[in-house]
Image: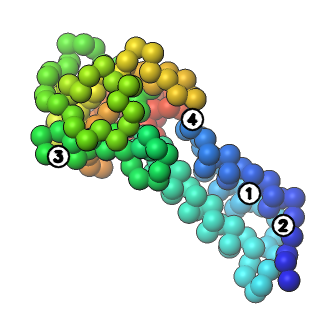
Amino acid sequence: MHDEPDPDERALTDGLKAIAMAVKPRQPERVVEQVLVSRAPTFALGVPRRSAAIVTVALVFVLVIGAVSIGYLNSQGASSLATATVGGVEYNLAAARNLNLPKGLLEPYGTATNIQVDADLFSGTAVFAIRGIDPASVLVLKLQPDARDDAGSLGEYFLLIRGPNAFRSLCPYFDPSSETSPRVCR
C-alpha cells in the first residue's frame, strides 16, 4: 500500500531538495521550523509522519550545514570535504566570500599540495598565515580575481581551516550582516 504525501509534505520535500541542491548558503532552520509548526501528525505504516519528517529534515540539515560551513565539496561533486595539505597537515577548504583581510596581515607560510578543488581557481599554491591567528587553525590561499561559482564571486581568498574555533578567530574580518558569513560571526 502506497501512501501519497499531502500538499504540505510535498512542499516540505521540494524545500529540502532546493536546500540540498543549493550552492549559495541557505537557512534550512526555516524548513525545520515549518515542520515543527505544521499540522497535527498523521500516521503511515504505524509511524507518525511528523516524526519521520523531522528525522529527514534533521539529517538534511546536518548534511547541508556541514557542507556549507566547511565551504566546498570537491571539484568532482562527490560528498567528501575538499582538503589541501600544507607541511604534512591536512586542512579543510572553505569559501570566504566576504572575508576582508588587509594585505599587511598576510605572511608567507608555505605551499599547498593535494588540493581537492579546481586548481584554476587559485593564483598559485602559495599559502599565507594571517598575523595574529594560529596558522595551525587557519591559513589562506589567494584566488584568481575572477573566481566565481553559481552563487557569485568567491572573494579574494579560500580558507584552509582546522579545528572548531577556526571561523571564530576570523570574525573581525567578516561582515556580520552578510548571510555568507560564518554563523558564529553573525
With respect to residue 165, does 48 lie above or below? below
User: Which quadrant of the rendered structure holds the N terminus?
Assistant: bottom right
Mark nearer the viewer, 2 or 3: 3
Amino acid type of disc 3?
Val
Question: Mark 4 to mark 1: distance in Å?
Answer: 19 Å
Expressed as whole percent of the image width and height from the top left, the position of residue 14 reads: 75, 52
Amino acid type of disc 4?
Lys
Q: Are marks 4 and 1 in contact (CB under 8 Å)?
A: no
Amino acid type of disc 1?
Thr
Query: How many residues crowd around disc 4 within 10 Å: few (fewer than 14), some, or many (20 or more)?
Result: few
Residue on which disc 2 sits = 5
Residue on which disc 4 sits = 24
In this image, 82 relative to 125: left or right? right
Q: Earlier in the sequence, mark 4 or mark 1?
A: 1
Residue lying at 57% horizontally and 29% vertically, measured from the top left = 151
SS for callout 1: helix
- Which one is nearer the viewer's eye here, 71 or 53? 71
Residue lying at 53% horizontally and 32% vertically, measured from the top left = 179
Which circle marks residue 89 in the picture?
3
Mark yes or no: residue 133 visible.
Answer: no
SS for callout 4: loop
Question: Mark 2 to mark 3: distance in Å?
Answer: 48 Å
Query: How many residues crowd around disc 2 within 10 Å: few (fewer than 14), some, or many (20 or more)?
Result: few
Q: Are marks 3 and 4 in contact (CB under 8 Å)?
A: no
Query: How many residues crowd around disc 1 within 10 Å: few (fewer than 14), some, or many (20 or more)?
Result: some
Residue on which disc 1 sits = 13
Question: Mark 3 to mark 4: distance in Å?
Answer: 29 Å
Amino acid type of disc 2?
Pro
Residue lying at 72% horizontally and 82% vertically, measured from the top left = 47
Image quadrant assignment for residue 139:
top left
Q: Earlier in the sequence, mark 2 or mark 4?
A: 2
Q: Are marks 1 and 2 in contact (CB under 8 Å)?
A: yes
